[in-house]
Image (cartoon, coloured by chain):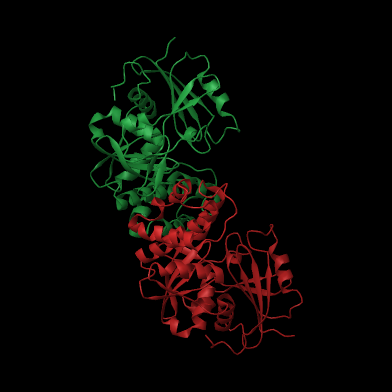
Chain colours: A red, B green
Amino acid sequence: MTAALIGLDWGSTQLRAYRYGERGAVEAVRTLPCGVRQLPAGGFAQAFAQALEGWPAAPVIACGMVGSRNGWRETPYLDTPADLDRLAAALTPLAAPDGRAVHLVPGLRDPARPDVMRGEETQVAGALALEPPMARRARLLLPGTHSKWVEVRDGAVVGFATMMTGELYALLRQHSILGAALPAPVPDGDAFRRGVRAARDSGAAGMLSRLFSARALLLDGALAPSSVADYLSGLLLGEELRAALAAGWAAPGEPVLVVGDEALCERYLRAAEAFGIGLRRAPGDAAAHGLWRIAAAAALVPGHATAA
Amino acid sequence: MTAALIGLDWGSTQLRAYRYGERGAVEAVRTLPCGVRQLPAGGFAQAFAQALEGWPAAPVIACGMVGSRNGWRETPYLDTPADLDRLAAALTPLAAPDGRAVHLVPGLRDPARPDVMRGEETQVAGALALEPPMARRARLLLPGTHSKWVEVRDGAVVGFATMMTGELYALLRQHSILGAALPAPVPDGDAFRRGVRAARDSGAAGMLSRLFSARALLLDGALAPSSVADYLSGLLLGEELRAALAAGWAAPGEPVLVVGDEALCERYLRAAEAFGIGLRRAPGDAAAHGLWRIAAAAALVPGHATAA
């Protein structure tokens, strides 16, 4: 067994390790519940050893919250605009206890807002590599706890914005009067669409003026307790799309490439129909491809220095 | 000692009891930590007895969450438009274990949204009684966990909307990445104004597109950890005002009467300066006055049947 590269997508909630063959094909994947938030103090070296156990020696590249203030080693953000070559030139080497060098991908900072990302820059690099026509000019959405809306020109991330949609949803479901003390949710596509439309029809006033409708509809008997979760989900995804249109991160008819978990992307695709936004799901594993491309651009992978 | 009326403002977090003299003057006030959310099952009768202990027999009127689904007795909502006479005609009597009748003020429901309130209808009645010129046509704001924006025409509440500003603030401070693991907040008026402006300048995109700035500014070193609370407070109050303008609950130059806790009202007054909204604090104890006025309109108070 040989390996050309080992890549780590090391986020808040999990660590995913990729073993690559010579031409960048992913030959093995491991997912460990060793996200930066779960690890005890000093737990990085042990999780690292566990992730790579039994794999051959190879250059290692890592992206995500592992490079944050609460990570293994804090790496500075790289200001936008940032393309693949700038990412590759800004890798921060970290010596693991076993002597290996781990090359940390920097996060990005958009100084215009300001806003920051860690890990998504690698997914963007991967998604653009998988769809070369997009690299010239593209809009991307990476939905999640902290959704990122990204604008790309000439292969470089020129700006981005974070929307805390997923975190707000979790807070409202777990701790608010809207979501607490409800029975287990039952999937309800109608309630989801109803939430999406409520956000859309709020106009410039936005979600804050409609959130309480989840409670009022429940008290009215117009929304089943088990459907509140999907209504809230629709309301929040709808608000994100409404805000993205208002802020210019999306425009009717212009395609937006969505990168992320399949089920979540499907939800966004359904919600986007109500707004006339042309979301399209990116193919493949964007993080895996991004790690490879950045490593290649940094000449960590022999013979691929110019592959970028 | 005699009493013309006993009034209870019985909300989620506390129970306030008023003892009134002949002409509606409040002669004693008791505040008990017996909100509807704190009480054990069956705790209403005991809290009621405690609130009235030693007070003479008198008609009793009560408003607030005591009439909700989780209250002492659920009373139906009264649909808007609703004026003092309709509120008074819709009182629901409840027999307390000691034989007294407690007259529960109904909450209001705005069928156009739908939206609901319980307790604020009484504060609105009181605020309008304290400022008779406002009763013909007024806009009111009752800020709090669930802020209410209210429109009054010819003495009747014709519509209202809830904004969950206070609850969202608490969730973000206690449970989100923005507020968790921060040192104790230190009052910072500049951070508050900065948050207000960030919400205002978000335009139609709104708060969701700016929430994460609390994190990015912190990481940037541009916001002190102890100032995040005031920045978030400004962001959320600013968003509420921005949304109120966008939805037509407020308009530049038109006065809005603010009813509520003094410190909170002061915050809203400061935030409103950035929007050109003319907030003005209502004088007096609106709940106490409202309970008296509704009781008088219901002829619970002898000789005051026409005082409304």
Q: Residue at x 47, y 66 (%)?
A: A148
Give the x, y percent position of residue A275.
Answer: 38, 67
Q: Position of residue B19 (x, y in %)?
A: 43, 18
B186 relative position to A73: left or right: left
Q: Is residue A60 above or below residue A307?
A: above
A57 shown above or below B165: below
Q: Where is residue A109 drawn, in percent x and y?
A: 47, 66
Residue B181 visible in the displayed image = no
Rendering quarter of residue A56: bottom right
Quadrant for the N terminus of chain B, please: top left
Q: How many marks?
A: 0
- Furthest-top residue in this view: B1
The residue lying furthest to the bottom in this view is A303
Quadrant assignment for the C terminus of chain B: top left
Q: Is residue B294 above or below residue A16?
A: above
- Can residue B276 be seen in the rendering of this structure? yes
- Is B212 on the left-hand or right-hand side of A16? left
Q: Quadrant of residue B259?
A: top left
Q: Pick whichever, B58 or A122, lies toward us.
A: B58
Q: How far across and down, in percent of the image, does residue B295 sit?
A: 37, 24
Q: Nearer the viewer, residue A225 or A137?
A: A225
Residue nearer the viewer, A42 or B241: B241
- Among the 4 quarters of the image, the one containing residue A2: bottom right
Seen from the viewer's position, the closer of residues B99 and A161 is: B99
The answer to whether A79 appears left or right of A28 in the picture is left
